[in-house]
Image (cartoon, helix red, strand yellow):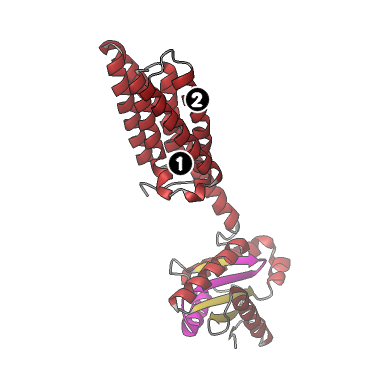
């Protein structure tokens, strides 16, 4: 999304610490150090310091009290404030320009690339307004170009590092939630998806089927043909299960060893048909499958109950001679 905020917790800390540090810094440079103290200037700086300290304290310790839009407009307000103070004080020194680093870094790290670009444009325009009214034209032009280029490169570097870190995190999260052998979800991911799927089915008044799948005599396959053949069997079965999980909300997972689970947004007839399709999709010579089916809300009202009912149906399928499908009662 173009205006999405990422990591509100980090954004709150960034805003809070900056404003708490900015309040005494503005007071020192605006009132204490200058030789002249016009009344209007003193009042303006004092109000600015009090406002900055109050909002900074709230951002640091009570961030929930600030509206979400605040975190999106914070770099723009900071840029306008910095440019305004520099313009009024006719301060185009390097020290005053360094304050622009914060809105640039904040936008590049916490906001979208579009917002970061808008912030850079606003910073460049704000500094131009100060430089061209405080310096000679040639010096102002050189100073404006230097500051704009330096801040743009800084923002680009931070945004690039952020994008790289985001991609790395996505890869790590995917690896943490996927079974490395078959590529389907692992037990951790399945447990989370089960809770979400049951909640979604409850809200929509839909039926949710859970198929628990067990490979018949899998230990014998490993003992007779070796683990490499056993791994191939697991991969073939995972592929067959993915073939029946056609909707975006459907989930296929390897729970561990030779046990799989499938969540399908369908009724009993659809679940039975899916079990038949899985068997038909397996190549000749593949091991047999015992499958237990349970449905929400017909057989369970919670995720734990749905898992228990599907496990009980799987046990019933094994008791009946394996290689078959049993429906929970």
- The disc, 1 or 2, on the residue closer to the chain's N-terminal end is 2
**Start-end of magenta stretch:** 254-281
Does dot 2 land on a helix, a strand or a loop?
helix
- In the displayed structure, 177 sits above or below 190; it is above
- Residue position for label 2: 25
- In the displayed structure, 177 sits above or below 219; it is above
The percent coordinates of residue 317 (x first, y second) are 63, 84
Q: Of discs 1 and 2, which sits in the foreground?
A: 2
Judging depth in this view, the residue of 1 and 70 nearest the camera is: 70
Outermost residue toward the front?
39
Residue 11 located left or right of residue 190: left
* Residue 110 marker: 1
The residue depicted at 29 percent of the width and 23 percent of the height is 129
Outermost residue toward the right?
223
- In the displayed structure, 270 sits above or below 133; it is below
Does dot 1 land on a helix, a strand or a loop?
helix
Residue 251 located left or right of residue 117: right
Judging depth in this view, the residue of 144 and 218 nearest the camera is: 144
The residue depicted at 48 percent of the width and 25 percent of the height is 27
Is residue 138 found inside the magenta-colored segment of the image?
no
The percent coordinates of residue 109 (x first, y second) are 46, 38
Give the class, few, some or many, for how many residues have Cα within 10 Å of label 1's Cα (few <14, many ≥20).
many
Inspect this view and state whether residue 233 appears: no
Inspect this view and state whether residue 106 appears: yes
């Amino acid at each position: 999304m173009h205006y999405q905020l990422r990591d509100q917790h980090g954004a709150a800390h960034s805003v809070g610490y900056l404003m708490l540090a900015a309040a005494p810094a503005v007071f020192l440079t605006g009132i204490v150090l200058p030789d002249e103290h016009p009344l209007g200037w003193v009042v303006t700086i004092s109000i600015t310091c009090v406002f900055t300290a109050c909002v900074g304290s709230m951002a640091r310790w009570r961030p929930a009290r600030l509206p979400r839009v605040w975190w999106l407009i914070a770099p723009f307000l900071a840029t306008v404030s910095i440019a305004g103070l520099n313009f009024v004080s006719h301060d185009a020194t390097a020290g005053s320009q360094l304050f622009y680093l914060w809105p640039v870094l904040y936008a590049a790290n916490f906001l979208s690339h579009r917002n970061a670009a808008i912030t850079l444009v606003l910073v460049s325009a704000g500094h131009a307004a100060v430089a061209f009214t405080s310096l000679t034209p040639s010096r102002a032009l050189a100073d404006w170009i230097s500051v704009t280029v330096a801040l743009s490169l800084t923002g680009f570097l931070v945004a690039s590092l952020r994008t790289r870190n985001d991609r790395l995190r996505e890869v790590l999260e995917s690896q943490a939630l996927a079974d490395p052998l078959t590529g389907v979800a692992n037990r951790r991911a399945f447990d989370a998806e089960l809770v979400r799927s049951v909640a979604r089915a409850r809200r929509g008044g839909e039926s949710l089927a859970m198929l628990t799948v067990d490979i018949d005599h899998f230990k014998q396959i490993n003992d007779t043909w070796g683990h490499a053949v056993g791994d191939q069997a697991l991969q073939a079965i995972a592929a067959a299960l993915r073939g029946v999980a056609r909707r975006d909300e459907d989930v296929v997972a390897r729970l561990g060893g030779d046990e799989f689970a499938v969540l399908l947004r369908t009724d009993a007839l659809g679940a039975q048909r899916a079990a038949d399709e899985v068997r038909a999709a397996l190549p000749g010579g593949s091991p047999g499958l015992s499958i237990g089916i349970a449905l929400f809300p017909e057989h369970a009202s919670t995720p734990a109950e749905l898992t228990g009912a599907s496990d009980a149906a799987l046990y019933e399928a094994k008791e009946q001679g394996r290689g078959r499908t049993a429906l929970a009662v």
